[in-house]
Image: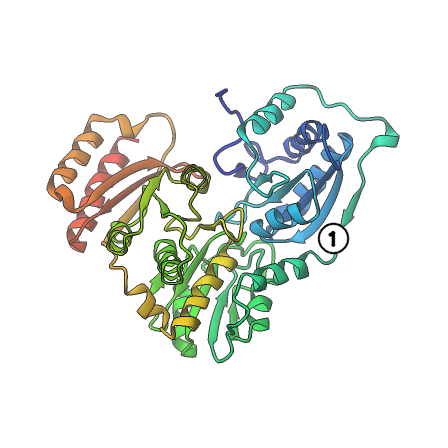
Amino acid sequence: MAERKFFGTDGIRGLVGEGPITPEFVMKLGWAAGRVLSKTGTKKVLIGKDTRISGYMLESALEAGLAAAGLKAAFTGPMPTPAVAYLTRTFRAEAGIVISASHNPYHDNGIKFFSAQGTKLPDDVELAIEAEMEKPLTCVESALLGKAYRIDDAAGRYIEFCKGTFPNHLSLEGFKIVVDCAHGATYHIAPKVFTELGAEIITIGCEPNGININDKVGATDVAALQAKVLEEKADFGIALDGDGDRVIMVDELGNKVDGDQIAYIIARDALRCGELKGGVVGTLMTNMGMEVALKNLGIPFVRAKVGDRYVMEELLRNNWLIGAENSGHVILLDKVTTGDGIVAGLQVMASIVASKMSLKELSDGMTMFPQVLENIRFKGENDPLQSEAVIAATQAVEQKLGDNGRVLLRKSGTEPLIRVMVEGQNAADVKQFALDIAKAVQENC
């Protein structure tokens, strides 16, 4: 496989105005993608974005590049990442493009591509786009330039799709739900989905202004949701991230219910209904409690590398349907082609309604192991993971944990961070072990 210059495991990301995310780069990217994608089909590309202020600028740059290559751009406006995947299939587009940096702060942004099937682009297509980036930008003749137009009913179409994944014989009537949209792309989608299914909703994080996306709200910071659930005496809360592909829930007592627990609830419900196909894919970060709980139910479980791309690869390899990351990416291949926070949340809600059990009662079936994650900013001059001191600190902790815990050190795929994860049975020990290894990493960065 050729070495990639721009594409990572989750598209292209960076600080706006620096690195790859400049208007000039994005225009060239649109042109290069257009050149590759224009060789077949409709010559139409769907473009969605989250609520970051830079999205308007980057949207225009993409449009210019695609037009120069002779492709039409169909704009959805602010739209969740999974909605773009769905709408790309619905409108028979060559590809879908999402302008978003997902859970990152507003000053970051990124570009993610979907194939005509609503899946991430194959490696050979990404490499072909990178190869085009090396060529001088040229323009098709004037009569062949691409045009742009807006899809006015994009939100309504996706709302109906989401509702269609909730069983027809069930209703959310009588439930009070707090909905946190992270001031992101689901702000005009999620509240309508849950309201139209009968719920009484209270919203937070639904007033985007271009710079408040993911700011102390959403799936990456559920403190505000926890407080609101308790204040409103709600049945539960649901938090989505900036682009809507992650979901974290909060039970009636204010306890966080993460992606591992959500996948466990969905898998157990599928098993109960006789609809489970195969097993569940987690990641290296998946809590050991999920592995143990699934084993007790007789449900197979495998771990993939961290990243929804790798979870998807493992699902396809095993021909399974349920995969998840503890951060809230939950993939349900019988319903969607990528992680979808709203759809995953709806499946948990269906289990709540059908079982007549609370979210806490459902999640109590899985006992979480204490897990501590420390993030150390990584400058890149040295590789601390190769340091003898870091290796020795890690081995010392692993020896103390034995078979009752795990240590995982890895570089983030989206930020310049070294992530140190320690998991075990004793919370105080796990915290100290994580700090010991993090200190060694910090001293050797």
In percent of width and height, residue 103 lies at 48, 49
In percent of width and height, residue 216 lies at 45, 59
Q: Depth check: 118 or 207 in front?
A: 118
Which of the image's four quarters has the C terminus? top left
Q: Does residue 119 sit above or below 390 in this rendering?
A: below
Outermost residue, front direction? 274
The answer to whether 173 appears left or right of 367 in the picture is right
Q: Residues within 10 Å of mark 1 (few under 14, many from 20)?
A: few
The answer to whether 376 appears left or right of 82 in the picture is left
The answer to whether 301 appears left or right of 342 in the picture is left
Say which residue appears at 46% left-offset and 62% top-offset: 347
Q: Does residue 21 sit above or below 291 in this rendering?
A: above
Q: Depth check: 370 or 278 in front?
A: 278
The image quadrant of residue 366 is: bottom left
Q: Depth check: 154 or 434 in front?
A: 154
In percent of width and height, residue 367 lies at 24, 59
Say which residue appears at 19% left-offset and 49% top-offset: 424
Say which residue appears at 55% left-offset and 76% top-offset: 198
Q: How is the image coloured?
A: rainbow
Outermost residue, right direction? 143
The amino acid marked with disc number 1 is Ile
How many numbered marks does the figure carry?
Answer: 1
- SS class, disc 1: loop
The answer to whether 57 appears left or right of 439 in the picture is right
Say which residue appears at 50% left-offset and 51% top-offset: 334
Q: Which residue is mark 1?
A: 151
In percent of width and height, residue 99 lies at 61, 44
